[in-house]
Image: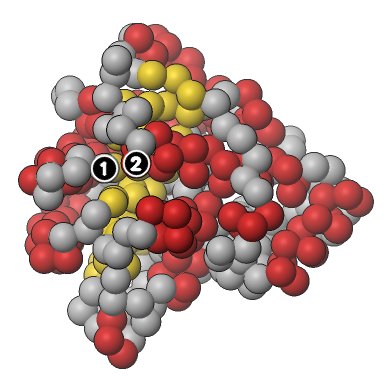
Amino acid sequence: MSEVLVIADERLARYGFGAGHPFGTDRQGAFRREFQDRGLSQRCRLGTTREAAPDELSLFHDPAHLALLRARSLSGQGWLDGGDTPAFLGVYEAAADVVGATLSAAEAIMGAEARRAFVPIAGLHHASRKGAAGFCALNDCGVAIEWLRARYGLQRIAYVDIDAHHGDGVFYAFEEDPDVAFVDLHEDGRYLYPGTGAAEETGRGAAVGTKYNAPLPPGADDAAFDAAWGPALELLEAQRPEFILLQCGADSLAGDPLTHLAFTPAVHRRAAQDLVRLAERLGHGRVLALGGGGYNRDNIAAGWCAVVEGLIGTG
């Protein structure tokens, strides 16, 4: 059986915001075609999603936000935030399926059914405990961190983010938590939403030094990534996480319509490979990669398949 699980079933493709919105429902299809064409589907185990239960969502999200999301889901009207994330009929169920896919993948890893996993429509890193933001109705990353602690008693979890946008919903939720190692290489917030993630943001209180933000200038390429990645790996090695989450947004690749970084897919492959090697050195091998952003469909296909190849150990 393959050591790598991929969850990319049709239910996940429902999470998107319709014609003309950058986060359309065609994003998963772009990945799946390339995934098939490269023969990767034959080297991975394929899984299915489920709808995350209310008590699972409540591990991270406030009840008021979940109630608002349910109401907007029934009406299909209005916004979930200040104007980036529109409601649609069934948005609660679609978002809960994203969270359910992330939790299902984590469960497979913890149960030794897979060593590593990838979920393309996941990594919704902007939603806060209290609300939606930046195309993210729920935050599957945050739910997964709390769920791994509650269900399996894990103490040290690492969250690594190479999406062009800063993972603010995760960072501020765990800014004072020393047991969550946070690493984020992103476009400088002076040029890109959400405007956060300065290098000086290294955690608060007991968590100072457990967070690493590396804001990169527009046009930053693979060499710039390499320079920032070394210190990131050093922090992760020192923290010795028991589980590693990788948010691998493809919007950091050159040519994305919403961002200004210039990575090649080699960055995504390297990030996945290096985290696999770290997890193996730590003795557990647990790496769960989440697709995150990306609005150029060719980049989605290339970047996410490079991640899968890194998880498999090829390339």
Q: Would residue 192 be seen by someone viewing this image from the given angle?
A: no
The percent coordinates of residue 22 (x first, y second) are: 61, 43
Q: Measuring 80% from the left and 55% from the top, which residue is drawn there?
A: 70
Quarter of the view holding residue 11? top right
What amino acid is found at the position of numbered circle 1 in the picture?
Arg
Q: Measuring 55% from the left and 65% from the top, which residue is drawn there?
A: 60
Q: Measuring 11% from the left and 59% from the top, which residue is drawn there?
A: 237
Say which of marks 1 and 2 sits in front. 2
Quarter of the N terminus within the rendering? top left
What amino acid is found at the position of numbered circle 2 in the picture?
Met
Q: Would residue 151 be seen by someone viewing this image from the given angle?
A: yes
Tag 1: Cα neighbours inside 10 Å, few (<14), some, or many (≥20)? many
Callout 1–callout 2 Cβ contact below 8 Å: yes
The percent coordinates of residue 29 (x first, y second) are: 55, 23
Q: Nearer the viewer, residue 77 or 20?
A: 77
Question: Which residue is under mark 1?
Answer: 286
Question: Which residue is under mark 2?
Answer: 110
Q: Secondary structure at mark 1?
A: loop
Q: Nearer the viewer, residue 64 or 127?
A: 64
Quarter of the view holding residue 219? bottom left
